[in-house]
Amino acid sequence: MLFLRIGREFKEVIKIIFVVTNRRLVQDEDFYTVIERVAKNKIDYLILREKDLDYDELISVTKDIKLITDKYNVPLIINGNLEVAEEVQAYGCQLGYETLNNSKEKCLKSKLKIGASVHSVEEAKNAEKIGVDYIIAGHVFETDCKKGLKGRGIGFIKNISNFVKIPVIAIGGINKENVTKVMESGARGIAIMSSAMKKNNVETIKCIKNLINNKS
């Protein structure tokens, strides 16, 4: 495993890549085919983020995805729904800051890895105090997923990294052209969505992985 858990903390081993799903970005391919191709090429973590699905739909999709991630030994993290994550025995759960803040005790009792999505230094500091294992911070650059919204920039990641000890994972518009600067800003890893859901995802992931590990 790329992160070793000590209490509720992670100990960094190498730089990592999270892939975040969005089946609506998949074009001319089956969603599960894309996920299998990504998992087969040894990504580090997969976050299943399909926010429009109801509980039963999410359970069904999650079980199918978990068959793939288990096959390739990729830890599966469920976005936004701790109940689903626990029911399918996922590796972890990724929660928005407000959701985390409103369910602190429940999250802390969970045996799963808990991540928080944050958008400010203050949120990052509070998430660390609550006891999450890592944070995903963004968005760093403008991205297709958040069109028209200006990215917070490299300085945002640097500021957060200076204030927390838990791993900071950067997200938002990260690609092979800018990933080196992101890692130099203090991020322990990155999360990608748009580029990972496209047909050339394998080449993109391999390139980014090589770049960030050269900076580890």
Image: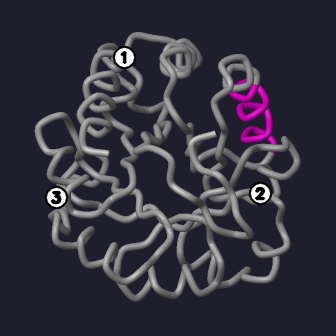
Residue beneath label 1, please? Answer: 202
- For marks 3 and 2 on the same chain, the one whose residue lies earlier in the sequence: 2
Residue beneath label 3, please? Answer: 148
Contact? badges 3 and 2 (CB < 8 Å) = no
- Residue 94: x and y in percent read 60, 58
Please, what secondary structure does the residue beneath circle 1 have?
Answer: helix
The CA span between labels 1 and 3 is 28 Å
Residue beneath label 2, please? Answer: 112
Please, what secondary structure does the residue beneath circle 3 have?
Answer: loop
Q: Which residues are magenta?
A: 56-66
Asked whether, in this view, residue 152 is left or right of residue 72, the answer is: left
The answer to whether 111 is drawn above or below residue 207 in the figure is: below
* Quarter where residue 115 is shown: bottom right
Closer-to-camera residue (191/5): 5
The CA span between labels 3 and 2 is 35 Å
Contact? badges 1 and 3 (CB < 8 Å) = no
Q: The N terminus is located in which quarter? A: top right
